[in-house]
């Protein structure tokens, strides 16, 4: 595939936003013109140029609303939200994370409101009771019919936006007649930015309240609920399924058995030994010196540490080790599970096959290849092919 950037993180991001064009959350010309303005590896320029494109789309969306063109306005707000999300991913390089995240969320909410007003899809904001507070969510229902329907629950990853939930599951679900919902779990989106709730490994304490909330609704068929976990959601969903058995079918894209490997594999052996020894002060001191030599790594770590609710690198790597599935948990899963297995999985290589082999429930391991243009974490540039295969499987497991 054409390399837009030498930096693998930025290259991956470009492939992802190009893939979002399939769900109309981006436009090819807008993406290519934005990328063309970003010098290779320049994270500040990345933030500035994606923000500039989003600002322009937002102005056009407001103009469309004023001129009485709500459909065009909704489309532009969705793309603006997508581009502000791209800026947010590198915003620690400029110190603008919270402000850009709020702009992305405001644009998304305007898309939601206009979509609901148009009447093709009914959209409802949710407040899901959770441990003395609520988690925000969105429920999308095709048309205005309110009879009980099969429902897809979309679980995001460690840094996925609400636009990512749309492009990786909700849009395809709606096209096939599903009701679909997504939610901000601990450490995700508004639960993190607005409520300060950090990640937790025991996701059964998150998915169960979500299902409690859904199954109480008259427009959700409690016997036909499927759950999809994307990126780090490929760990959280199997973890929750070990004790939550109201799910008819589940998707892990990709399968993740041990979240910590993607962090620990980048550490020198000397630092791993310090981590193992429990020497917090020395580990943090060594990391501070190392990060002074690599601003890009420092920015990446700041981004990755935020949802864990820690400021110490020792605490971050230690916390990540708790995000691992046991054989007992995997054996307790009973519903059919689809595990995607893309070539060149860069974050958790080999773990999809490892997860599938460890499951005792009905399991399908679904490969995606380089020859198909579908390799890489979550198949970023193959949104059509991914959606077709995943939802064909879901349709077989949970018929309409």
Image (cartoon, rainbow, N blue to C red):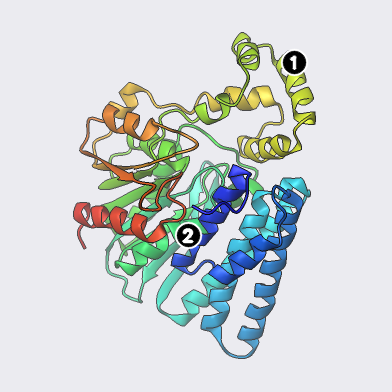
Which corner quadrant holds the C terminus?
bottom left
Helix, strand or loop under label 1: helix
Q: Is disc 2 surrounded by few (<14), some (14 to 19) or many (20+) residues within 10 Å?
A: many
Which residue: 22% across, 34% down? 361
Which residue: 64% across, 50% down? 89
Q: Is residue 174 left or right of residue 319?
A: left
Q: Nearer the viewer, mark 1 or mark 2?
A: 2
Nearer the observer, 325 or 365: 365
* Residue that lies at the very extreme toward the top in this rendered image: 277
Report the number of numbered marks: 2
Ranked by sequence position, the earlier of labels 1 and 2 is: 2
Q: Position of residue 161 (x, y in %)?
A: 55, 54
Q: For residue 236, what is the image quadrant?
A: top left
Q: Position of residue 300 (x, y in %)?
A: 67, 39
Q: Position of residue 351 (x, y in %)?
A: 39, 31
> Residue 19, which numbered label?
2
Nearer the observer, 76 or 37: 37
Q: Is disc 1 surrounded by few (<14), some (14 to 19) or many (20+) residues within 10 Å?
A: few
Vertical position of residue 281 compared to residue 307: above or below: above
Rounded to the nearest angstrom, the CA distance separating label 1 from label 2 is 43 Å
Give the residue number, with chain letter if any, for mark 1.
Answer: 281
Helix, strand or loop under label 2: helix
Vertical position of residue 226 compared to residue 118: above or below: above
């Amino acid at each position: 595939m054409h390399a837009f950037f030498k930096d693998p993180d930025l290259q991956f991001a470009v492939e992802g936003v190009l893939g979002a064009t399939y769900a109309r959350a981006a436009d090819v010309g807008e993406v290519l013109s934005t990328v063309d303005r970003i010098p290779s590896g320049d994270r500040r320029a990345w933030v500035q140029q994606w923000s500039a494109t989003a600002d322009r789309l937002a102005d056009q969306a407001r103009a469309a609303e004023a001129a009485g063109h709500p459909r065009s306005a909704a489309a532009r707000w969705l793309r603006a939200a997508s581009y502000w999300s791209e800026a947010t991913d590198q915003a620690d390089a400029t110190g603008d994370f919270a402000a850009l995240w709020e702009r992305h969320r405001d644009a998304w909410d305007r898309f939601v409101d206009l979509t609901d007003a148009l009447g093709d899809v009914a959209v409802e904001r949710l407040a899901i009771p959770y441990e003395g507070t609520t988690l925000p969510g969105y429920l999308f229902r095709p048309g205005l019919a309110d009879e009980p329907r099969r429902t897809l629950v979309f679980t995001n990853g460690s840094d996925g936006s609400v636009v990512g939930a749309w492009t990786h599951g909700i849009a395809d679900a709606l096209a096939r007649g599903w009701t679909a919902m997504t939610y901000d779990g601990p450490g995700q989106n508004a639960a993190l930015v607005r409520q300060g709730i950090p990640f937790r490994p025991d996701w059964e304490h998150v998915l169960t309240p979500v299902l409690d909330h859904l199954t109480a609704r008259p427009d959700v068929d409690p016997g036909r609920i499927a759950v999809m976990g994307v990126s780090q959601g490929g760990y959280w969903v199997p973890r929750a399924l070990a004790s939550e058995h109201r799910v008819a079918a589940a998707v892990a894209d990709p399968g993740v058995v041990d979240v910590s490997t993607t962090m620990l594999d980048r550490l020198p052996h000397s630092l791993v030994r310090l981590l193992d020894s429990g020497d917090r002060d020395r580990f943090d001191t060594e990391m501070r010196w190392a990060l002074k030599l690599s601003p890009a790594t420092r920015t990446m770590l700041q981004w990755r540490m935020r949802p864990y609710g820690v400021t110490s690198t020792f605490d971050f790597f230690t916390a990540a080790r708790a995000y691992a599935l046991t054989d007992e948990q995997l054996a307790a899963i009973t519903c059919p599970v689809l595990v995607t297995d893309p070539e060149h999985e860069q974050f958790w290589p080999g773990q999809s096959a490892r997860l599938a082999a460890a499951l005792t429930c009905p399991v399908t391991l679904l490969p995606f290849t380089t020859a198909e243009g579908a390799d890489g974490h979550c198949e970023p540039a193959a949104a059509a092919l991914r959606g077709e295969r995943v939802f064909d499987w879901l349709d077989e497991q949970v018929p309409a």
